[in-house]
Amino acid sequence: MSVRRPRPAFSELSVTEFLTLSRVGYFPHGPHGPGAWGLYVDTMPRALLAAAIFLAAFLLFNYVLVLTARAHAQIARAMLRAPADPLAPVKEVLTRPGPLGPLHAAR
């Protein structure tokens, strides 16, 4: 005769039990029931595999986040920098010593 122990609350689980019973997704009728989707971790090898996969995804997401921040900063710098001076060629001619030459290049 086998006596089944009641399923403990999460506060009563050991660390190993907590890691091996974690889930990511939606399981309205259990892990193999209808409408279930996601990652259901029920063994230690699956927990280690899931941890490795999520670690790799975390590291890749860091690169995506940094690239997004750099692109945002570059766009902000381009939009907020001082506009080009439309009179820069004239100011250059006026600051040179000597008689004034033609303002426009000969055609």
Image (cartoon, grey):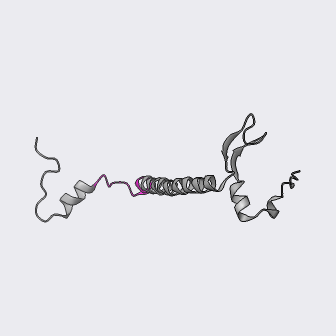
| Residue 67 % position (x, y) | 45, 54
Q: Position of residue 34 (x, y in %)?
A: 74, 34
Q: Residue at x 42, y 57 (%)?
A: 77
Q: Quick check: 95 above or below 29?
A: below
Closer to the camera, 59 or 34? Answer: 34
Residue at point 83%, 58% (across, down) = 9
Left or right, 95 with respect to 26, comes to left
Residue 99 sits above or below residue 26 on the image: below
The correct choice, above or below, for 39 with respect to 16 in the image is above
What number of labels is visible? 0
63 magenta-colored: no
Q: Please report the residue visible at 40 percent of the width from the left and 53 percent of the height from the top.
A: 78
Direction from residue 47 to residue 78 in the image, left or right: left
Residue 34, placed above or below residue 102:
above
Q: Going 69% across and 56% down the picture, which residue do you hit?
A: 20
Residue at the outermost top position: 34
* Magenta span: chief secondary structure: loop
Along the line of sight, which residue is nearer the eye, 4 or 86?
4
Counting from the top left corner in percent of width and height, residue 105 is at 13, 47
Quadrant of residue 107 within the rendered picture: top left
Q: Position of residue 49 (x, y in %)?
A: 57, 53
Locate residue 52 relative to residue 44 in the image: left or right. left
Q: Is residue 86 magenta?
A: yes
Q: What segment carries the magenta color?
A: 77-87
- Foreground of the two, 8 or 60: 8
Task: Say which of 12 and 66 sits in front.
Answer: 12
